[in-house]
Amino acid sequence: KGITKMKFFRASLLAAMLCTVAVHPVVGAQIHILSVPAGYTTGSIELGVPFAGSLAPLPSDPTKLYVSVGSYGAQSIALVDTVGASIQIVASGFGSIGGIAVLSNGDLAITENATSETILRAHDLTNDGDFLDPGEITALISPILADSPFGFTGAQIALAPAGNAAAIPAGALVIQTADGETSSELLVVENPETSPAFRPAGGAFFSGFQYNGGIDFSNSGHVIMGEGMFDMLTFTSSGRIYALVNTNADAVIGAGEWNVLVSETQLAAGLSDLAISKEDDVFTVEGSGTVRTFALPPNLLSGSATPAVFAQTDSPYLSTVRFDDKTKTFAPGATAPSARLYLGGYASDWTAATNLVWIQPQPTSHIENWAIY
């Protein structure tokens, strides 16, 4: 399968091979936020074990997060209570978890790209709050178009929202692969809870890119997709961001239905993940400690954008960016309940960090130099 199976270009990199799974929770290498704009506050959640790159908030309670932890070849899924500061291993026995999504019935959809190389479902048969009992983790559906030399490279997963302008059925899974060259795909799995099937049958929703760089939906329901790029000759990374607008509402993105919003010249440090706020602002992370942002242009098929620096961390590689609740505002100085933006990746010594850091709007009355009259 190769030494690294090339899948570390997605989010792991070679440093993941140096990590060890903690037997008992201990504070390890940390990521620290160095700067954020005025009107935001920051914090950290200690996991006690190395973060392995995948994160999915629990929709019914966004203060709880499903997080992949461990090292390449030995990964688990933990349920993290960000309020009670507790962590519970709820599923184990994975080689490499590319992505996690929470289905509407509470099951987990998991892309596993090392040992089983398939798309898994975790279902709590015993209703004990975990997926550790026999028979609780099974194949959800066998992958298609796994044309990488290293097998299935399933990475991030997004869940299609209701009323989707992309014509993807609500609740369907959108899975990004990382086959390399121009062989990667976005795969759509409809009815994942009952009778999972690929849409279109045997084909991809969109294809022709190198590696994964994250997927999310705009507020109007269009797919915004990142592409991680790697030049084998120069050993350098870059990235692109696409808008996919399914104008004819069929099962595929065809000619004239996609546009490069951000070119590789603007993402010279690569692209590992992206997330979109309630305000339709895109936030990206990359092969550095920088978080960038840009507003989606009004016309996704003709517009373009220039990312600006939003925040800076001391991480050499941020692998994950995720909102806990996209229905809440992320505008600075929020007067209503606000969303929290989580970041994960590698600590400054190139070991997987044992913490997640977060950024959240600060209430108006707490903004620096604000005066109350």
Image (cartoon, rainbow, N blue to C red):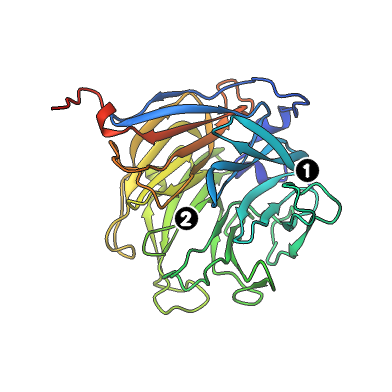
Would residue 236 appear left or right of 335 to someone viewing this image?
right
So how many labels did they put on this image? Answer: 2
| Image position, residue 272 (x, y; %) | 52, 43
Q: Secondary structure at mark 2?
A: strand
Query: Residue at label 2?
Result: 216
Q: Toward which corner of the image does residue 125 lie, by quadrant?
A: bottom right
Q: Nearer the viewer, mark 1 or mark 2?
A: 1
Kindly state the secondary structure of the residue where label 1 is placed: strand
Q: Earlier in the sequence, mark 1 or mark 2?
A: 1
Image-based side of 284 in relation to 318, left or right:
left
Q: Taking 220 as reference, is 44 above or below it?
A: above
Q: Residue furthest left?
A: 373
Nearer to the camera, 343 or 84: 84
| Residue 201 drawn at (x, y percent) | 64, 77
Q: Residue furthest right?
A: 134
Residue shown at 51% from the left, 71% from the top: 168
Identify residue type, mark 2: Asp
Three-letter code for the amino acid on which mark 1 is drawn: Ser
Q: Quadrant of the C terminus?
A: top left
Quick check: 153 above or below 64?
A: below
Relative placement, left or right, of 266 versus 252 is left
Pointer 2: residues within 10 angstroms few (<14), some, or many (20+)?
many
User: Which residue appears at 53% of the width and 25% of the height?
Assistant: 31
How dense is the environment of label 1, judged by Cα within 10 Å: few (below 14), some, or many (20 and up)? some
The percent coordinates of residue 291 (x first, y second) are 41, 36
Residue drawn at the location 39% of the way across and 72% of the way down:
256
Which residue is the site of mark 1?
A: 92
Which quarter of the figure has residue 70?
Answer: top right
Separation of marks 1 and 2 at Cα, in angstroms = 27 Å
Give the x, y percent position of residue 98: 65, 48
Above or below residue 257? Residue 62 is above
